[in-house]
Structure formats: C-alpha cells, structure tokens
C-alpha cells in the first residue's frame, strides 16, 4: 500500500522529516492522519504551507487517473459458471477484478458452487497452468466431490487417466486458524499469487471464523477486521485481475417484533462486496425448489434462476419455466432477497 | 487608533492570525496582543521589539493589512448569489421525479450526498451522472467532464458504456422530435466511447489515498477545466474501517469536506458523494436506518438524499436542502440506466427542455 511509504522517500527536507518523526509521524499514512492545525504547530509553518506540503506528498502517492474508456479496453475477463442465464447477465461469468459473494442458508449449495468454480478456474487458462487457491474455513472441501464435478461436466477433457489428478494438483487448499490468520494470509498473498500463478481465490466461508470469534461486545472489532479483509481481497482481485469468490452465511434478524432471514456479517460487509448472489429455497406448485438471485451488481439486473444440485454441481433447473428477469431491474430485492428490508 | 475607526475593522487577537507558532509567540512575548497594538508600526521597529528577523516582521504586518483593510473584500451580496443561482445549470438524473425533487437536477457549486443500502443503485446514479454531465450546451446541459473517485471497485465500465450508448440515442431522438438542427448536429457528434473518454477515473485503496487524491484535486481541476462533476463512490468505505480514533476521523472528514466544498465553490463544480447506511439502535428492540459516518458528517453536504426500497420500488428522499422542500421521488434502473418510474405522473416536463433565462 502506498500509504505505508516512509516520509524519508517523499522528497522532503531532512529537517522536516526529522521534526515529523519526533512526533511519531513516520509514514504518509501518519502524515495524513493529522489535522492541518496539528501539522502547523509541529512544523512551525503557515497553514498555506501545510497544504502545499500535503499536496506535494499527496501527488506522490495518489493513484493516477485513467479514463473510463481505458478501463473498458483494459484486461477484463470473466470466469464462466456454466449456469447460462447467470453468465449471460453477468457479462460472461463471475468477474475478474471483483469480489463476488454467494450467500444462502446451509445446504443449498454454496460449497458446491465453489467447487464447480474451482474446476472452471483450472480449465480457464489451461495453457498457463493457472492454479486455484481455496481457503477452507469450515473444512468442507472434498477432493472426491471436486473430481466428480470435473469428470461429470467435462468427460472428454478428463477421460485420460491421470488428467483429473493433474487438475486436483492445481487446487491449493489452505485452512486458516483464525480470522487474524486469514487476514495475515491475504495480506501476504502477493508473492504466492505471482509465483504460483493463481487465477482464482475462493474463501468458503468468510463468515464462520468471524462469527465464531467475535461476539456482542467485540462487534466493532469484527467489523473492522472484515473491512480489512474486504480491502485486502479487493486489492488482490484488482491488482492481479482475478476473480475472488467468497461465501457467506445467513442469520436471523429481529426487527420490530418480526424475524427475517438476512445475510450475516452486517450491512457494512454487504457494501464491501462488489457482487452478491443469493441462494434461496422456494416453494412452487411443482414442490420445493431452489433459486439463485443476483441481488447486487454494478452491471446485472435482478434475475431469479431456478437450479438443482447434481453430480455436475449447480445446474439450471429446466423443469421450471425460463428464469424470470424481474422487470426493469425494479423489483424489490429488499423484500425477497436475504438482505432484508434495509 | 484613527486607522481602525476609519476602516471599521474589528480588533482581532494575534492568536487568530495564520502565523507560524514561533512568530506568534514572539509577538506575545513582546507584548503585542491584538491588531490594535500593531497599528502604525514599521517593520524595523517590530523586528527589533519582537526580536525577529526583518522578513518575519514584514510577514506579520502584511498578514495584518490584508485583514483589517478589506475584511469584507470577498463578500457577495445576496443578489449576486441569487443571480448566480439562477444561472447555474443542473445535471439531470434522467428520472423526472428525482430531477423535480432536486429542483432541476444536481446543482453545481454544491455537495449532494446519496446514501442507501447496498444494491439500491448509488453506483448506478453515480455512473449516470458521469455521463449526463456531458449533455451538450444546446440541450441546456453543462457539456462538461467528470471525475469518478472509486473507493470500492464498483465502477463497471461495460455498464457505463451501455448507459452512454442509450444516452446518445436518447438525445438524438429528442433532437429529431423537435426538428432542432443545432441539437441534431450536436447529438450526432456524441459517441459512447467519447463519453467514456471524458470520465476521469481514480481508484483509491485506502483512506490515505482518498485524502491524497482530494488534496491533489485542485491541480487536476486546474489542468482539466472542463470537469463539472466530481463523484466519490463511496465516501464512507475506507473511513468506516481505517480509523480507531473517532474524533480524529471526524476531524479528517470535516477537513476533507471543507476542501471539497471549496473546490465546488471556486470552480462551480457539482460534488456528488455516495454514503453507506448503518443501523442506529433506538432501544427497546427498535432500530432505524441512518446515514453512516455519524452526526458530525451530517453537516458536510449541502443536499442529502436517502435511497430506499418501498413496495418493491426505488425511492430517493431529499431530507436536507437549504432551498428545496423535503420530498421523495421514485426512480427506476433499467438496462439503459437511471430512468423515470413507470408510475410517474404524466405531463411532467423534462427538466432539460424547460426554457431557462439565458
């Protein structure tokens, strides 16, 4: 992070740096953490000069602008999910450079979705032998199930003996010991991503550690840690142009005497993820079913896609009529989706 | 003393001048308490009495004279302000009801804040405004450029391109319907990629970068004078997690707000801020959704709107504005971008077609 740059490397006069260090201001972050008046007193210069100083240091670390057009033409990329309607609305699949969250009650298929994406990640850039990092916080990863999904979906690709073994070797599973350990892993992941050529990061689930370790009184610490994890994930996703997939759990919220199901980890986490997919159980005249909804996305409309969990992972349920695109993006997610009426 | 009576200036305490602390202390030690003590004194005299260099003495006297002789130099009459307001143009949102509630659209020279739950459409509004600021002058628009400061990675270039494409088509259709040759020609000159070319995108990764970008905005605007809107999406994200010391956070936020407000005012630019919402516990099992960043932040923006869902529809409620009444407007997000809700009242005039005094 640029903000950690020490002031000694900011082209400031040594005398100024020394003065600042005397007051425990060592990095750019420390400098910007002080008010103008504090700095005026510390450096014994006028307010205008303080602003000039901040402007000069700011210019060194501030991100440079690009035009939106350049962004368009930059490296993009989506990782197909093989759920066609979903790939269609998301513009090709789960987006590289963003954090996509899949949230839902236990047993509806979040882990299955993640395992399916592992297969897609391995197949995506075959020539580059990209690897998938699977951070497993609930010890639910199953090599056997991954193998089954691979061979069911792509029988030809994995027909050769040993081919599935080759794929399994490219999925790296890491089990963090705590939320802080998870943050440490994320913050130190840059070299691993480069040396191992990681093309997809999956965290299943981001919620369990946080919810287990933090309770009522430490909720603020939990939110702060989650925020840091979110920033780290986004930074990795964007810097390396890879997709990041995280799973989240459901909790019950009591509001005005009623209880509703909402996504865990609170509204701040919901703001942090770029795209949110929700899995929900449904009831229709054909009996119980499952639906996947896109409930937060900068580019996709709200869509409801009925699905089933099969040997191949998650598949569109074709027995139900074609997925509804909720008209004009206007149908209220708040009432149907798991965010609850926020 | 005569000087003071003539200019009618107020006798100001030395402490209030923006002088470096060491100079200030020297003045106090030498017995100078306020401006009146310094009236009529010459630099050499002051230098020797206060034991400072000639340059410092001159600095002191210069800072004085700019204060007492022209205290109201930069003041404007209410009429000047009124005329300026009448001339100011708006950036339309493309939702007629929302534009109406905003008094025509997003105003330049002011800070407007949109807060709301995730998924309500804040980023969509931000992207739409980055496109709509480019409405040509012949359509009564600002024909300006946009700065988009993205703190969360929400900006979606493909989606923005879709909005820009729909924007061009829409303007052309309107121009043709009115058979206005100038407008038709201007609309035809627009192209979606060109629109995206005029959106300057900054991606900030933490609160320090956010503060740094704001500090450097002045010089960016100086080199890009056509910028008419600065969108920060969202102002809240990094500030909610990077700070442990709440009072420091408040001070840093207010400082940032002041810098932004000064940019808005000096360059007549619209500043649009996206904020999060949080839950405020009211006790007895009740809670309310409120804008994030606390009560002190509430004073920063000129106009504030909260976006929310109701009966499966999207609404924006203007709850703070110095000159507009509180009101709610329904809006819709379609594949083309922000649009008027289908249940809008017919006959509502499109704001950018209203004839404005030239």
Image (cartoon, rainbow, N blue to C red):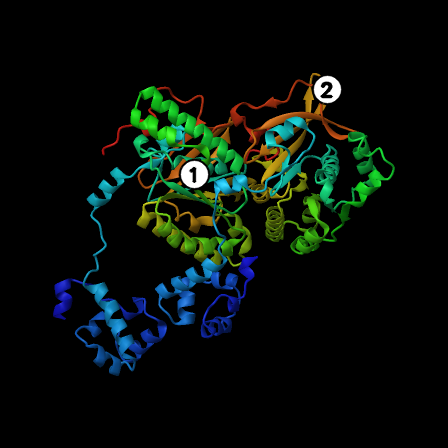
Residue extending farthest top? A285
Q: Is residue B167 above or below residue B300?
A: above
Q: In this view, does B299 lie above or below A100?
A: below
Taking the spot 25% from the left edge, 38% from the top edge, the residue there is B86
B40 lies left or right of A230? left
Indicate the quadrant containing the C terminus of chain B: top left, top right, bottom left or bottom right: top left
- Residue nearer the viewer, A244 or A139: A244
- Return the x and y of residue A20 as percentages of the image width and height: 48, 70
Q: Is residue B121 visible?
A: no
Q: Which residue is under mark 1?
A: B130
Q: Is mark 1 on a helix, strand or loop?
A: helix
Q: Which chain carries label 1?
A: B
B349 lies left or right of A271? left
Taking the spot 43% from the left edge, 71% from the top edge, the residue there is A42
Please rate how many residues cluster around mark 1, counting C-alpha atoms within 10 Å: few if below 14, some from 14 to 19, many from 20. Answer: many
- Residue nearer the viewer, B99 or A243: A243
- Residue nearer the viewer, B194 or A296: B194
State the mark number for residue A287: 2
Nearer the observer: mark 2 or 1; the answer is 1
- Residue nearer the viewer, B2 or A196: A196
- Return the x and y of residue A32 as percentages of the image width and height: 47, 61
Q: Find the distance from the CA under tag 2 to the CA under tag 1.
A: 46 Å
Residue extending farthest right? A161
Query: Are callouts 2 and 1 both on one chain?
Result: no
Q: Is residue B97 visible?
A: yes
């Amino acid at each position: 992070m640029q903000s950690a740059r020490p002031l000694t490397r900011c082209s400031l006069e040594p005398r100024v740096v020394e003065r600042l260090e005397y007051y425990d201001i060592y990095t750019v972050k420390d400098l910007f953490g002080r008010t103008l008046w504090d700095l005026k007193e510390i450096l014994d210069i006028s307010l205008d000069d303080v602003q000039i100083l901040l402007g000069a240091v700011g210019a060194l670390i501030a991100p440079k602008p690009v035009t939106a057009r350049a962004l368009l033409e930059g490296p993009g990329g989506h990782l197909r999910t093989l759920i066609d309607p979903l790939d269609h609305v998301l513009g090709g699949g789960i987006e590289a450079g963003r954090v996509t969250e899949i949230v839902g009650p236990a047993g509806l298929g979040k882990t299955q979705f993640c395992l399916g994406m592992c297969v897609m990640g391995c197949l995506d850039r075959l020539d580059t032998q990209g690897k998938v990092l699977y951070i497993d916080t609930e010890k639910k990863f199953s090599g056997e199930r991954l193998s089954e999904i691979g061979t069911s979906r792509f029988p030809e690709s994995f027909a050769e003996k040993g081919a599935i073994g080759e794929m399994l070797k490219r999925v790296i599973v890491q089990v963090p010991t705590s939320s802080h350990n998870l943050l440490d892993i994320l913050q130190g992941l840059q070299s691993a991503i480069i040396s191992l050529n990681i093309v997809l990061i999956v965290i299943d689930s981001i919620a369990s550690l946080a919810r287990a370790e933090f309770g009522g009184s430490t909720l603020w610490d939990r939110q702060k840690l989650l925020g840091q994890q979110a920033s780290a994930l986004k930074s990795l996703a964007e810097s390396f142009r890879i997709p990041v997939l995280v799973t989240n759990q459901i909790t019950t919220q009591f509001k005005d005497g009623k209880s509703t199901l909402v996504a865990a980890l609170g509204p701040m986490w919901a703001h942090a993820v770029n795209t949110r997919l929700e899995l929900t159980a449904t009831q229709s005249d054909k009996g119980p079913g499952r639906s996947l909804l896109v409930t937060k996305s900068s580019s996709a409309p709200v869509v409801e896609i009925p699905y089933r969990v099969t040997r191949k992972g998650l598949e569109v349920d074709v027995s139900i009529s074609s997925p509804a695109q909720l008209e004009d993006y206007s149908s209220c997610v708040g009432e149907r989706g798991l965010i609850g009426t926020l | 003393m005569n000087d003071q009576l003539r200019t009618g200036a107020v006798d100001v305490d030395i402490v209030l001048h923006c002088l470096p602390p060491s100079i200030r202390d020297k003045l106090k030690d030498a017995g100078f308490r306020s401006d009146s003590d310094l009236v009529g004194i010459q630099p050499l005299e002051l230098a020797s009495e206060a034991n400072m260099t000639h340059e410092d003495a001159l600095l002191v006297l210069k800072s004085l004279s700019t204060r007492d002789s022209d205290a109201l130099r930069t003041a404007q009459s209410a009429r000047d302000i009124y005329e300026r307001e009448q001339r100011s143009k708006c950036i339309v949102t493309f939702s007629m009801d929302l534009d109406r509630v905003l008094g025509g659209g997003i105003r330049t020279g002011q800070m407007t804040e949109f807060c709301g739950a995730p998924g309500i459409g804040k980023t969509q509004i931000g992207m739409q405004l980055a496109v709509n600021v480019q409405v040509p002058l012949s359509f009564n628009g600002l024909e300006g450029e946009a700065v988009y400061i993205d703190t969360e990675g929400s900006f979606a270039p493909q989606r923005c391109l879709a909005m820009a494409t729909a924007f061009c088509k829409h303007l052309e259709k309107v121009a043709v319907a009115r058979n206005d040759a100038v407008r038709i020609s201007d609309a035809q000159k627009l192209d979606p990629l060109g629109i995206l070319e005029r959106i300057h995108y900054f991606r900030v990764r933490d609160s320090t970068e956010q503060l740094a970008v704001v500090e450097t905005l002045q010089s960016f605007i100086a080199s890009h004078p056509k910028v008419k809107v600065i969108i920060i999406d969202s102002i809240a994200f990094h500030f909610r997690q990077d700070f442990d010391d709440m009072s420091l956070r408040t001070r840093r936020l207010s400082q940032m707000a002041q810098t932004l407000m000064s940019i808005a005012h000096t360059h007549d630019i619209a500043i649009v801020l996206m904020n999060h919402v949080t839950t405020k516990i009211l006790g007895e099992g009740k809670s309310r959704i409120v804008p994030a960043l606390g009560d002190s932040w509430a004073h920063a923006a000129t106009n504030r709107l909260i976006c929310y869902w109701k009966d499966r529809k999207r609404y924006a409620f203007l709850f703070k504005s110095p000159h507009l009444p509180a009101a709610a407007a329904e809006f819709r997000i379609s594949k083309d971008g922000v649009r008027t809700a289908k249940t809008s009242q017919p006959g509502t005039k499109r704001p950018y077609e209203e004839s404005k005094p030239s």
